[in-house]
Image (cartoon, grey):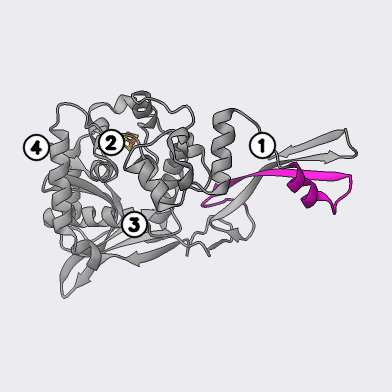
Amino acid sequence: MRILSKSKLLAYRQCPKRLWLEIYRPDLREDSAATQAAFKVGHQVGEIARRLYDPKDEGALVELQKDDLQAAFSHTTELLRSSRPIFEAGFASGGAMAFADIMLPLRKQGHVSWRMVEVKSSTSVKDYYRDDTAIQAFVARGAGVPLDSIAIAHIDREWVYAGAEKYEGLLKERDLTEEAFGRQDEVKTWISESQNVVALADEPRIATGRQCGDPYECGFLEYCRSKEKQAKYPVSWLPRMQSRQLRSLIEERGVKDMGDVPDDLLKERQRRVKAHTVAGTVFFDAEGAKSSLQDYEPPAYFLDFETIYFLITHIRQPILGACMALAGFSTRRRRDEGSCLRACICG
Ligand code: SF4
């Protein structure tokens, strides 16, 4: 039996085909720039967390050398006999393995037990973090670790960076012990179902859909799409697809082209988008624009700006920890009926 990592089990939770591709065709995976940036931020927050949870620098890091998992597990077992913080402690049990971001020793009546903290570069506790902690707890306890509790540490959105590389207060904890310990049978089922997927000779036949971006953007999207007939007018171009009927038509009945969506399931604006897209015509609400702009006279300024989302900024000013930063903007000035002047600042 193959030992599956936590990330493989989470891949299965997103889509069984994703798990199969991760195992057998990792070469097809293309992580977007946004996904790569998220990995980078996660790494940065992880480094900061180590400093915060181990201010005296007494902890030990379990480094994975040349993919030697067994050495990492043995090193962890050795470190668990000590009572110092451990980073990236590795465990394996029940057909799965996991690496804990932070393990902190607790001394109670002469016994050492452990508090596990998983660090997330997000400002809230997402549902899939709950699956994550359930897996971590299952594997660690199954490996015989006396686990006292497990928590998620995430970014506190109210935190203000005061400069000088001081990050105290950046992370906020949410204890998930009871929930994680109570889901051990579920985790067992995920492992066994994942093992069944891994045993398949061919990739599972699963069409692209909502799961491809939920909870993570799937790196196999281009590959999966390339094997499907492409819609000429994808339904994703329709605005505000919130109605349950419309969603079920797309997700359960596999309708991909907006030309195949009945008009009576669409709202007025969606019908308009569909009609003009399929007919290849342009819609411009000249009357609406005229009425909205009638109170304004030239010169008119049109401002367009872009932002970048930083979880942590290193701007040496008090600033919110999770904030938007202006990346650039451009403006156009219309002086009269015909001329338009453009200015642009990027930074
Ligand atoms: S792109 Fe979608 S269908 Fe393909 S593996 Fe990923 S989640 Fe599954």
Above-or-below relation of 243 to 286 = below
Q: Secondary structure at mark 2?
A: helix
User: CB at mark 2 closer than 8 A to ligand 1?
Assistant: yes
Q: Are marks 4 and 1 in contact (CB under 8 Å)?
A: no
- Ligand 1 occupies quarter: top left
Q: Earlier in the sequence, mark 1 or mark 2?
A: 2
Inter-mark Cα distance, 4 to 3: 29 Å
Q: Do labels 1 and 2 touch, CB within 8 Å?
A: no
Give how far across and how far down residue 234 sits, in percent. 47, 33
Q: Quadrant of residue 285?
A: top right
Earlier in the chain: of badge 4 and badge 1, it is: 4
The vertical placement of 281 against 242, above or below, is above
Going 39% across and 50% down the picture, which residue do you hit? 245
Q: Quadrant of the N terminus?
A: top left
Q: Residue at x 20, y 53 (%)?
A: 79
Q: Mark 4 against mark 1, which lies toward the viewer?
A: 1
What residue would you read off at disc 3?
127
Q: Secondary structure at mark 3?
A: helix
| CA gap, disc 3 and disc 1 | 41 Å
Badge 4 marks a residue whose secondary structure is loop
Q: Residues within 10 Å of mark 3 (few under 14, many from 20)?
A: few
Q: Which residue is mark 1?
A: 283
Magenta-colored span: 286-315
Closer mark to the observer between disc 3 and disc 1? 1
Q: Secondary structure at mark 1?
A: loop
Q: CA distance from mark 4 to mark 2?
A: 19 Å
* Residue underneath mark 2: 18
Label 4 belongs to which residue? 1
Q: Which of the marked residues, 4 or 3, is nearer the chain's N terminus?
A: 4
Q: Is residue 290 magenta?
A: yes
Residue 143 x %, y %: 12, 53
